[in-house]
Image (cartoon, grey):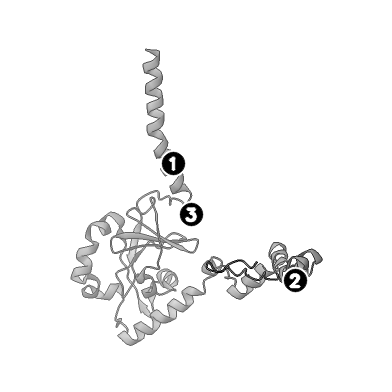
């Protein structure tokens, strides 16, 4: 019974070992995840005019909902989740909706004024949004119902919208949190120069330079010179003719 008990323990340990190894590999990825967001009740959102991007306006961080995902910019990186407060997944690119958002939307929200027009935004519970966002987008709900709640507002021409997107992309690249992540890359010629100045590399180069000199000095040694005397060839012995008689 004791042998059977110890055998079961060893088997359980062997089965648990690969899982612990896999967990160690996942932890080794050096991309931090944002902390959870604590909401007493589920959050309410508003829709940004001229977009189908929704944002939680009453918190200090930028928390968006777009295309069925919750989006969050944290530490200069983008994350998304199916939940507004947990299980964030790193997203390697900038979501394309971000450059359609006016950077001053918070000020317009507080003033209830969108570019000189009264903005009667609608507060949308998160659960209602998650259930209806796709139908609203397909039906173009916010254009049909009073242009996003902005009174007497006319959307911008497409050319002006494209120019604003390009301008916002340039401004985004200059954000301090993004600049801190971009470590300057050392140019290749500089690396090569630093490599050549390493003591071990210089000693190897000096050895290679001295090697031809040592070979020349070796060739001039007297014992080596004496071995290189030209060998005198011995005359080949002529064979005697078989029919010749010896002289008497």
Q: Residue at x 54, y 70 (%)?
A: 179
Q: Earlier in the sequence, mark 2 or mark 1?
A: 1
Foreground tag (3 vs 2): 2
Residue 239 shown left or right of residue 73 in the figure: right
In space, the residues marked 3 and 1 are separated at their CA atoms by: 20 Å
Query: Which residue bears the numbered disc 3?
Result: 32
- Which one is nearer the viewer's eye here, 201 or 78? 201
Residue 225 is situated, as x and y percent measured from the top left of the image, at: 77, 68
Q: Which disc, if any, is residue 136? A: none
Q: Please name the residue shown 40% across and 50% down the image.
A: 39
SS at circle 3: loop
Which residue occupies 58% across, 73% down?
A: 188
> x%, y% of residue 84?
36, 54
Identify the residue under disc 1. Answer: 21
Question: Closest to the observer: 214 or 131?
Answer: 214
- Point out residue 15 in the picture as x, y percentages from the top left corner: 37, 33
- Crowding near pointer 3: few (<14 within 10 Å), some, many (20+)? few
Q: Quadrant of residue 5?
A: top left
The quadrant of the image that shows the C terminus is bottom right
Upstream in sequence: badge 3 or badge 1: 1
Q: How many marks?
A: 3
Residue at mark 2? 216
**140 or 76: nearer the viewer:** 76
């Amino acid at each position: 019974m004791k042998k059977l008990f110890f055998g079961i323990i060893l088997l359980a340990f062997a089965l648990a070992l690969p899982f612990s190894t896999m967990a160690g590999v996942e932890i080794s990825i050096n991309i931090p995840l944002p902390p959870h967001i604590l909401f007493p009740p589920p959050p309410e959102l508003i829709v940004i005019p001229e977009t189908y991007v929704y944002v939680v306006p009453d918190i200090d961080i930028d928390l968006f909902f777009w295309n069925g995902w919750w989006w969050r910019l944290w530490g200069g990186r983008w994350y998304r989740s199916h939940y507004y407060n947990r299980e964030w997944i790193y997203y390697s690119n900038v979501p394309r909706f971000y450059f359609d958002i006016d950077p001053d939307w918070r000020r317009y929200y507080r003033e209830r004024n969108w570019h000189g027009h009264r903005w009667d935004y609608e507060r949308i519970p998160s659960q209602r949004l998650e259930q209806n966002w796709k139908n609203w987008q397909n039906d173009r709900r916010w254009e049909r119902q009073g242009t996003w709640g902005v009174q007497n507002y006319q959307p911008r021409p497409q050319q002006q919208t494209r120019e604003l997107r390009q301008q916002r992309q340039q401004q985004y690249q200059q954000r301090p949190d993004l600049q801190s992540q971009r470590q300057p890359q050392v140019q290749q010629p500089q690396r090569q120069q630093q490599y050549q100045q390493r003591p071990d590399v210089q000693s190897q180069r000096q050895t290679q330079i001295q090697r031809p000199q040592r070979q020349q000095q070796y060739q001039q040694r007297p014992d080596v010179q004496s071995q290189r005397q030209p060998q005198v060839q011995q005359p080949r012995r002529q064979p005697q003719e078989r029919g010749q008689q010896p002289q008497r």
